[in-house]
């Protein structure tokens, strides 16, 4: 027959059971999320954004991407870069891949050829992606910076026809300083068949029509100083009467190399460019380049990514954003105002 447990034992057992119950309750309590202190906000969710680049291997794009990544990191957003490599068809495929993956909250586009991307970007918007367009026109009108696709969260671009107009005006002015009539010009396209190249060149020709400026030779740089050097060497050999060279900053770098390699003097040629790089700003300040039309890739990257953050975090669309607002000299660098500018890319 079992003996009854002593009272002391029963008291110890009761205390032990109470302690176990208390520990169990404490464990349950610790599993609940800690209350947020007044004034503290919960951590923001990490968001994913795809950047469809014009071309990663381009000194113009480097500061743009750097600013995109900086602003993204400050706002708990991860950037995945897709290299368009100067190929609009590749960009279409890349955007289709981004949509199909279902992994991204937003997408930043920098078109190689704007008309080719309109339909696929519309598909991205319809799929629920927040889209910001930067730098290049997304659409088929290259005379305006206004949004051409409904549903964009922001549009931060330069206008190719404005660039060509300002370039033409500076070429006319440069020729006038030396009373050249005719003024024989070598014009170097970057990508001659591109929509931006065509719009720029058309605007340039509209300005020089009826002036002493005469285009006697053309070349192509592909945004590459080495290619520009070869093109300029060939042009100067075939056209020793060239007075002025007009092209992008990468083209001007190649032109300088071609002239110096041939034993020529830079002072024998007028030069007018566009890009606004650190290199060109210095050359304009020295007087080696007559004038340069500014571009602002870092500013475009920053403004575009800030607009993306505002759209994703706050639901705000910023629409058209002018990256050239309030620039001195209308965005044209001359020897007189060169100190007022800061180049945003190396050149």
Image: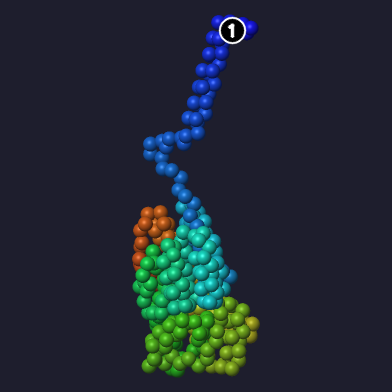
Q: Position of residue 244 (x, y in %)?
A: 50, 86
At a point 46% along the width and 72% down the height, the residue shown is: 120
Q: Position of residue 201 (x, y in %)?
A: 45, 85
Query: Is residue 33 visible in this depiction of the protein?
Result: yes
At a point 51% along the width and 65% down the height, the residue shown is: 100
- Tell me the quarter of the image containing the N terminus: top right
Q: Which residue is at the front of the view, 341 or 153?
A: 153
At a point 52% along the width and 56% down the height, the residue shown is: 78
At a point 48% along the width and 91% down the height, the residue shown is: 215
- The residue at which mark 1 appears reads as 5
Q: How is the image coloured?
A: rainbow
Q: Position of residue 270 (x, y in %)?
A: 50, 84
- In the image, taking residue 147 as reference, residue 64 lies left or right, namely right
- In the image, taking residue 94 as reference, residue 214 lies left or right, namely left
Q: Which residue is at the front of the view, 97 or 285?
A: 97
Query: Is residue 167 visible in this depiction of the protein?
Result: no
Q: Position of residue 62 (x, y in %)?
A: 54, 66
Give the answer, above or below, for where 50 lies relative to 20: below
Q: Using the rendered view, name the quadrant where residue 221 is placed.
A: bottom right
Q: How many marks?
A: 1
Q: Which residue is at the front of the view, 67 or 319?
A: 319
Give the answer, above or below, for where 251 lies relative to 5: below
> As drawn, which residue projects farthest toward the front?
1
Task: Count neighbours of disc 1 (C-alpha within 10 A) and say few if under 14, some if 14 to 19, many if 20 or more.
Answer: few
- Tell me the quarter of the image containing the C terminus: bottom right
Give the answer, above or below, for where 100 lies relative to 77: below
- In the image, taking residue 221 as reference, residue 211 lies left or right, namely left
- In the image, taking residue 184 as reference, residue 322 lies left or right, namely left
Dot 1 falls on a residue whose secondary structure is loop
């Amino acid at each position: 027959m079992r003996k009854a447990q002593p009272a002391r034992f029963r008291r110890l057992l009761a205390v032990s059971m109470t302690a176990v119950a208390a520990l169990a309750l404490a464990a349950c309590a610790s599993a609940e999320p800690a209350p947020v202190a007044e004034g503290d906000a919960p951590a923001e969710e990490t968001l994913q954004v795809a950047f469809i680049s014009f071309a990663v291997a381009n000194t113009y794009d480097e500061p743009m991407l750097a600013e995109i990544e900086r602003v993204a990191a400050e706002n708990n957003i991860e950037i995945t870069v897709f290299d368009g490599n100067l190929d609009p068809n590749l960009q279409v495929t890349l955007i289709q891949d981004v949509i199909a993956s279902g992994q991204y909250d937003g997408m930043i586009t920098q078109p190689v050829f704007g008309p080719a991307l309109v339909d696929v970007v519309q598909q991205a918007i319809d799929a629920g992606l927040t889209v910001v367009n930067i730098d290049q026109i997304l659409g088929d009108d290259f005379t305006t910076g206004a949004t051409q696709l409904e549903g964009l969260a922001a549009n931060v671009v330069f206008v190719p026809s404005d660039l060509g107009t300002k370039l033409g005006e500076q070429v006319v002015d440069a020729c006038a300083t030396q009373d050249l009539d005719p003024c024989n010009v070598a014009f170097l396209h970057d990508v001659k068949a591109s929509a931006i190249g065509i719009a720029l060149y058309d605007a340039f020709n509209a300005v020089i029509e009826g002036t002493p400026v005469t285009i006697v030779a053309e070349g192509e740089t592909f945004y590459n100083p080495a290619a520009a050097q070869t093109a300029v060497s060939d042009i100067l050999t075939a056209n020793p009467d060239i007075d002025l060279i007009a092209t992008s900053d990468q083209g001007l770098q190649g032109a300088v190399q071609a002239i110096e390699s041939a034993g020529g003097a830079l002072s024998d040629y007028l030069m007018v460019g566009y890009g606004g790089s650190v290199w060109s700003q210095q050359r304009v300040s020295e007087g080696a380049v007559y004038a340069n039309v500014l571009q602002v890739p870092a500013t475009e990257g920053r403004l575009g990514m800030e607009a993306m953050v505002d759209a994703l975090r706050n639901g705000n669309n910023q629409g058209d954003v002018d990256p050239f607002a309030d620039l001195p000299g209308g965005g044209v660098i001359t020897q007189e105002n060169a100190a007022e500018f800061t180049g945003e890319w190396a050149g």
